[in-house]
Image: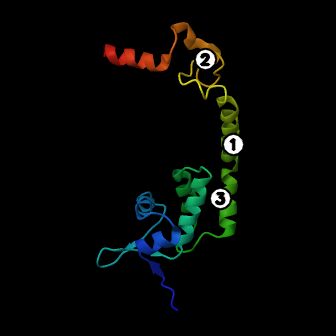
């Protein structure tokens, strides 16, 4: 069985589990590259499969595509990222991931006081209304009412 050196966008989509539209988006953002055939069809090198997997894993852990693109730009063209590449690139993201984890833990722990409120102006809300500052303006969803009042006066 001969393995093709290039994949069509449909083959890449089927093999990677990523929608064709997402692949086009990745290409538009410079994360992956293709060449065009004389019939203007996209052809992707086989190493694009690993690059797409790399993109998806990075997205899954919350790395913005901008940072993924910067990381992929440090890799040589024409070869798939290796385990060593992933270790080197991901170690650079460790501090940001740790900060995100810390923020998410704080959000999880603090959000339980506000989850049933709806208006986010109860006296215990440390996220959106520390010390119930909005309570002095009256009852109800003060943030929404202020926006409505501003919209009505425009």
Residue 89: mark in rendering: 3
Pointer 1 residue: 101
Circle nearer the viewer, 2 or 1: 2
Secondary structure at badge 1 equals: helix
- Indicate how the structure is coloured in the image: rainbow
Give the answer, above or below, for where 12 lies relative to 64. Answer: below
Residue 122: mark in rendering: 2
Q: Residues within 10 Å of mark 1 (few under 14, many from 20)?
A: few
Choose the circle earlier in sequence order: 3 or 1. Answer: 3
Spot occupied by residue 117 in the image (x, y as percentages of width and height) = 58, 23
Secondary structure at badge 2 equals: loop
Spot occupied by residue 137 in the image (x, y as percentages of width and height) = 51, 8
Circle nearer the viewer, 3 or 1: 1
Circle nearer the viewer, 3 or 2: 2
Choose the circle earlier in sequence order: 3 or 2. Answer: 3
* Residue 22 position by quadrant: bottom left
* Position of the C terminus by quadrant: top left
Are the residues flagged by discs 2 and 1 in contact, CB closer than 8 Å?
no
Q: Residue at x 56, y 22 (%)?
A: 120
Q: Residue at x 49, y 64 (%)?
A: 18
Spot occupied by residue 92 in the image (x, y as percentages of width and height) = 67, 53
Out of 106 and 93, give the one closest to the viewer. 106
Q: Residue at x 48, y 19 (%)?
A: 143
């Amino acid at each position: 069985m001969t393995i093709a050196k290039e994949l069509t966008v449909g083959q890449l989509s089927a093999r990677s589990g990523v929608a064709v539209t997402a692949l086009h988006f990745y290409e538009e953002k410079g994360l992956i590259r293709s060449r065009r055939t004389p019939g203007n069809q996209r052809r992707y090198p086989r190493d694009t499969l690993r690059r797409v997997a790399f993109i998806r894993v990075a997205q899954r852990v919350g790395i913005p595509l901008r940072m993924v693109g910067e990381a992929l730009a440090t890799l040589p063209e024409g070869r798939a990222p290796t385990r060593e590449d992933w270790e080197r690139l991901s170690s650079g993201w460790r501090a940001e991931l740790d900060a995100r984890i810390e923020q998410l833990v704080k959000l999880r722990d603090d959000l339980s006081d506000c989850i049933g409120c709806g208006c986010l102006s109860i006296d215990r809300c440390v996220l959106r209304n520390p010390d119930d500052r909005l309570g002095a303006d009256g009852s109800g969803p003060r943030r929404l009412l202020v926006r409505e009042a501003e919209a009505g006066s425009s």
